[in-house]
């Protein structure tokens, strides 16, 4: 395994654990019927969340987060 891949996996392990927890919670929940207005409201919230996440990714790229964060952990910078 390359040093960069090891660095990436080590630096994102907490996110991986949270992803698995979210998937398990999603699979375990029971379905709740919703009306049409609730689906529209959900679609709006999801669209806003995706937009905010895009701005967040842009901010991380512009500030060099992918180089600076791994260095805080003593790891190789990500490409």
Image (cartoon, rainbow, N blue to C red):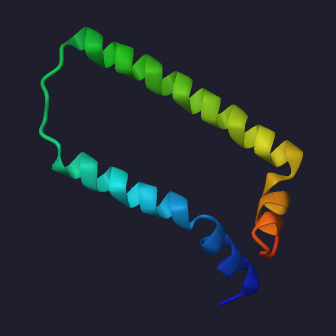
The picture places residue 27, in percent across and down from the top left corner, at: 21, 51
Q: Is residue 23 above or below residue 77?
A: above
Answer with the quarter of the image where residue 38 lies.
top left
Where, quadrant-wise, is the N terminus in this rendering?
bottom right
The picture places residue 69, in percent across and down from the top left corner, at: 78, 59
The picture places residue 13, in percent across and down from the top left corner, at: 54, 67
Residue at the location (79% across, 38% down)? 59
Question: Relative to the observer, which residue lies in front, 47 or 5?
Answer: 5
Q: Is residue 55 visible?
A: yes
State the residue lying farthest toward the bottom.
1
Residue at the location (52% across, 58% down)? 15
Q: Is residue 78 visible?
A: no
Q: Is residue 58 above or below residue 38?
A: below
**In this picture, residue 20 sits left or right of residue 37:** right
Question: Relative to the observer, which residue lies in front, 22 or 45?
Answer: 22
Where, quadrant-wise, is the C terminus in this rendering?
bottom right
Q: How many marks?
A: 0
Q: Is residue 13 above or below residue 1?
A: above
**In this picture, residue 42 sits left or right of residue 56:** left
């Amino acid at each position: 395994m390359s040093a960069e891949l090891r660095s990436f996996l080590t630096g994102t392990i907490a996110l991986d654990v949270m992803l698995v927890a979210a998937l398990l919670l999603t699979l375990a929940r029971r379905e709740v019927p919703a009306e049409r207005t609730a689906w529209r409201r959900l679609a709006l919230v999801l669209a806003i969340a995706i937009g905010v996440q895009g701005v967040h990714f842009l901010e991380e790229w512009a500030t060099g987060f992918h180089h600076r964060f791994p260095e805080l952990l003593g790891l190789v910078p990500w490409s």
